[in-house]
Amino acid sequence: MLERRVVVVVYAGAMSLDITGPIEVFDTANRLLGPSGIPYRTDFVSADAPVVRMSSGVVMEASPLEAGEGPIDTLLVPGGWSLNDALGDQVLVSWIGRAAARSRRVASVCGGSFLLAEAGLLDGRRATTHWAYSEAMACRYPDVTVDAEPIFVWDGPFVTSAGVSTGIDMALALVEADHGSALALETARFLVLFLKRHGGQSQYSALLDAQLADHPPIRAAQEWILDHLDAPLPVAEIARQANMSQRNFARVFRRQVGTTPGQYVERTRIARARELLATTDLTISQIAGRCGFAATETFFRSFGRTLGLTPREYRHRFQVISPSGLIDRHHGRESSPA
């Protein structure tokens, strides 16, 4: 094999970073590759050839889909704001299905996994997509096991990555698989990236994806929990607020909310903690107390188990700064940065 052929599917309204992120990784790996290594060669194909405008206004040149015939090492499918139009393009979807059969592996970025699923390529497999669309994907493609947490998922010859920039993480993993960890690390260092990003998508997504229950007693209990997060909140006390026996409450709560009362309380505490970490200058111990954690150590363990980050790491990444200081959205005030 003289080269590794990467064929990128381009369509009008695709997100440019879904494409440029991974191909910059491949190009950088080529430049760092020794003379005995097998380089990547990137081809762009599109039903909208020869000039395709991305959602950001960036214009890319591409060849017709027919230029993508022949053996393919890696087929790369991006997502984009025009994904619904792409899903309705049967020519494009059918071509992706046929091209996948000629590919050693198939990779998608963000909503590109929808196109793979639409072509029937992910049935019976595990996949991921952008956290905001994971539920929609699971509903639309019930034969696909959608996991909204990982940065990317590798199942057989299919590699699906999560939202937008995670295509870069995925491309680094592909380089590592092809050329070893040394080149992947050198590529990551040159691009000033983590070789393996810490944590999953939950650090970026809204943690409380479950809506308030339809059943009035359970809904009232959920609202009471939100108003009393600084309290111990034993299940027996929450059940009393719903005017139900503890056993019946636990059973109905799980059926309505999809999790146990104890798990829901912990998730709600973490969600409140994330808000306070990002928008206030409260200390870690103060936040732990406001969110009902009896000890700071307990807070650290729960936070790390849920998000794969420490509270300090989360604050460093996501703290919101205004020109006049930190904005505490929850309490509607401003304060000086810590």
Image (spheres, grey):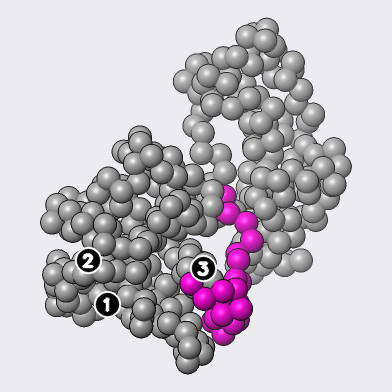
Using the rendered image of the protein, determine whether residue 284 is visible from the camera's viewpoint. yes
Say the numbered circle drawn on residue 140. none
Occupied quadrant, residue 68: bottom left
Where does label 3 land, which residue? 177
- Percent from the top left, x then y, of residue 334? 66, 60
Dot 2 or dot 1: first in sequence order is: 2
Badge nearest the viewer, 2 or 3: 3
Vertical comparison of 73 with 330: above or below: below
Badge nearest the viewer, 1 or 3: 3
Q: Looking at the rendering, in which quadrant would you find the C terminus?
A: bottom right
Instruction: State the residue in front, 13 or 18.
Output: 18
- Whether the residues at callouts 2 and 3 have beta carbons within 8 Å, the answer is no
Say the numbered circle drawn on residue 43. 1
Left or right, 139 with reference to 320: left
- Percent from the top left, x then y, of residue 144? 38, 40
Q: Which residues are magenta?
A: 177-202
Q: In terms of secondary structure, where does tag 3 sit?
A: helix
- Find the distance from the CA under tag 2 to the CA under tag 1: 14 Å
- Percent from the top left, x then y, of residue 319? 64, 62
Amino acid type for the residue under numbered disc 3: Ala
Vertical comparison of 146 with 73: above or below: above
Please rate how many residues cluster around mark 2, counting C-alpha atoms within 10 Å: few if below 14, some from 14 to 19, many from 20.
many
- Find the distance from the CA under tag 1 to the CA under tag 3: 21 Å
Badge nearest the viewer, 2 or 1: 1
Instruction: State the residue in front, 133 or 161.
Output: 161
Asked if residue 32 is among those painted magenta in the image, a careful observer would answer no
- Percent from the top left, x then y, of residue 70? 21, 70
- Whether the residues at callouts 2 and 1 have beta carbons within 8 Å, the answer is no
Vertical comparison of 305 with 180: above or below: above
Amino acid type for the residue under numbered disc 2: Tyr
Where does label 2 land, which residue? 11
